[in-house]
Image (tube, rainbow, N blue to C red):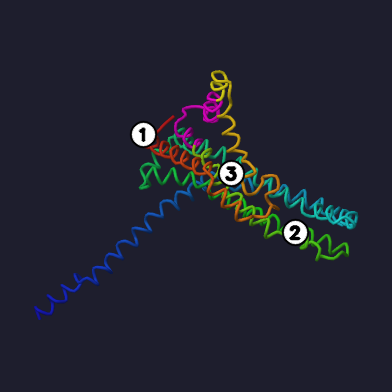
């Protein structure tokens, strides 16, 4: 009996059992590493309701105006039937306008969110409470960076798709009531293509390409004692002003402008017509391999590293 018991007690130490035990230990560790990030992002959405309320409010206002204008849609269609180009613009223009309005709203939300993300918790001293939780400064700052880079683009696409579907429903009801055919709507509304282009534009351009701007604003938000909006604008303006006075050049301003607005050979979807511009693989590859993109990402990583270090030592404004 003692021999059997000793053998049974020794069995967990066998190679196979030790492998099982290691997997049981590693799996919860991996899950526990991802859970703080997910929880931190949920915390940002809970504390900053304007992230989703602002685009929803703009979409609601636009739908209200579109529902009223839909009663004039049959007349516009009849007056444009002889001109295919004009008919196409008449049908698709409101959908394109809705995309741009929602996208512009979420971009403004991202701008002010980044300026207040770290400054707000120092101002009201809530940072002391959050630091007492088992969430690292790295996770906290990266979760705040994920809002403008990942969450807001995905939210913009979701709100835009819902808005387009409701617009299409309103159009169907009015056109059916007027006795017109519905088939021509789908021929002039490449909605899936619009949504695909919008998703790529927001994730690639508003997310990756604008990452240095978001990271800079987070850095200022974690450092400024007063007026983070002014501190975010004054240093770039001062650098440009000194360069102009000292060397009579404006290279710094042109770099900022080109990275913010983008140039036609770098941005694969023009901002003025990104919902309709077809995505081509060469343009996307050229954009993803451009030095401007990767230099910007390296600068963003440096800004985030400084912001993480700042948060470790600053607890009030």
Q: Quadrant of the N terminus?
A: bottom left
Could you say which is closer to the camera, residue 65 or residue 25? 25
Q: Quadrant of the C terminus?
A: top left
Q: Secondary structure at mark 1?
A: helix
- Predominant secondary structure, magenta span: helix
Whether residue 148 is visible to the viewer of this picture, yes or no, is: no
The residue labelled by disc 3 is: 50
The residue labelled by disc 1 is: 313
Foreground mark, 2 or 1, reads 2
The residue labelled by disc 2 is: 189
Could you say which is closer to the camera, residue 121 or residue 269? 269
Residue at 79%, 59% (x, y): give it. Answer: 171
The image quarter containing residue 229 is top right
Could you say which is closer to the camera, residue 242 or residue 317? 242
Q: Earlier in the sequence, mark 2 or mark 1?
A: 2
Whether residue 314 is visible to the viewer of this picture, yes or no, is: yes
Circle on res. 121: none
Residue 65 versus residue 123 in the image, above or below: below
Q: Secondary structure at mark 2?
A: loop
Q: Earlier in the sequence, mark 2 or mark 3?
A: 3
Q: CA distance from mark 2 to mark 1?
A: 54 Å
Foreground mark, 2 or 3, reads 2
Using a 10 Å C-alpha cutoff, classify the residue at mark 1 as few (fewer than 14 neighbours), some (14 to 19) or many (20 or more): few
Q: Are marks 1 and 3 in contact (CB under 8 Å)?
A: no
The image quarter containing residue 161 is bottom right
Side of 203 relative to 136 (left or right): right
Q: Position of residue 184 (x, y in %)?
A: 81, 63
Q: CA distance from mark 1 to mark 3?
A: 29 Å
Q: Which residues are magenta?
A: 216-239
Q: Is residue 139 magenta?
A: no
Q: Position of residue 188 (x, y in %)?
A: 78, 59
């Amino acid at each position: 009996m003692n021999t059997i018991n000793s053998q049974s007690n020794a069995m967990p130490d066998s190679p196979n059992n030790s492998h099982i035990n290691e997997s049981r230990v590693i799996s919860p560790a991996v899950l526990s590493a991802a859970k703080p990030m997910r929880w931190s992002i949920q915390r940002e959405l809970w504390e900053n309701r304007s992230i989703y309320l602002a685009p929803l409010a703009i979409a609601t206002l636009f739908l209200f105006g579109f529902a009223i204008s839909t009663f004039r849609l049959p007349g516009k269609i009849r007056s444009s039937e002889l001109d295919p180009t004009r008919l196409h613009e008449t049908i698709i223009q409101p959908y394109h306008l809705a995309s741009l309005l929602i996208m512009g709203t979420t971009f403004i939300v991202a701008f002010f969110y980044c300026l207040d993300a770290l400054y707000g918790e120092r101002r009201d001293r809530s940072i002391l409470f959050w630091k007492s939780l088992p969430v690292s400064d790295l996770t906290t700052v990266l979760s705040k960076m994920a809002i403008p880079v990942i969450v807001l683009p995905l939210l913009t696409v979701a709100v835009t798709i819902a808005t387009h579907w409701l617009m299409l429903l309103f159009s169907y009801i009015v056109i059916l009531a007027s006795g017109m055919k519905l088939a021509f709507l789908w021929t002039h509304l490449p909605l899936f293509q619009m949504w695909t282009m919008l998703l790529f534009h927001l994730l690639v351009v508003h997310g990756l390409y604008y990452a240095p701007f978001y990271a800079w604003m987070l850095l200022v938000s974690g450092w400024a004692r007063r007026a983070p909006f002014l501190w975010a604008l004054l240093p770039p303006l001062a650098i440009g002003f000194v360069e102009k006075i000292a060397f009579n050049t404006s290279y710094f301003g042109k770099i900022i402008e080109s990275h913010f607005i983008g140039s036609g050979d770098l941005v694969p979807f023009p901002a003025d017509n990104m919902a309709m511009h077809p995505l081509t693989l060469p343009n996307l590859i050229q954009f993803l391999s451009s030095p401007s993109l990767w230099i910007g990402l390296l600068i963003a990583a440096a800004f985030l590293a400084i912001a993480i270090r700042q948060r470790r030592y600053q607890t009030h404004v």
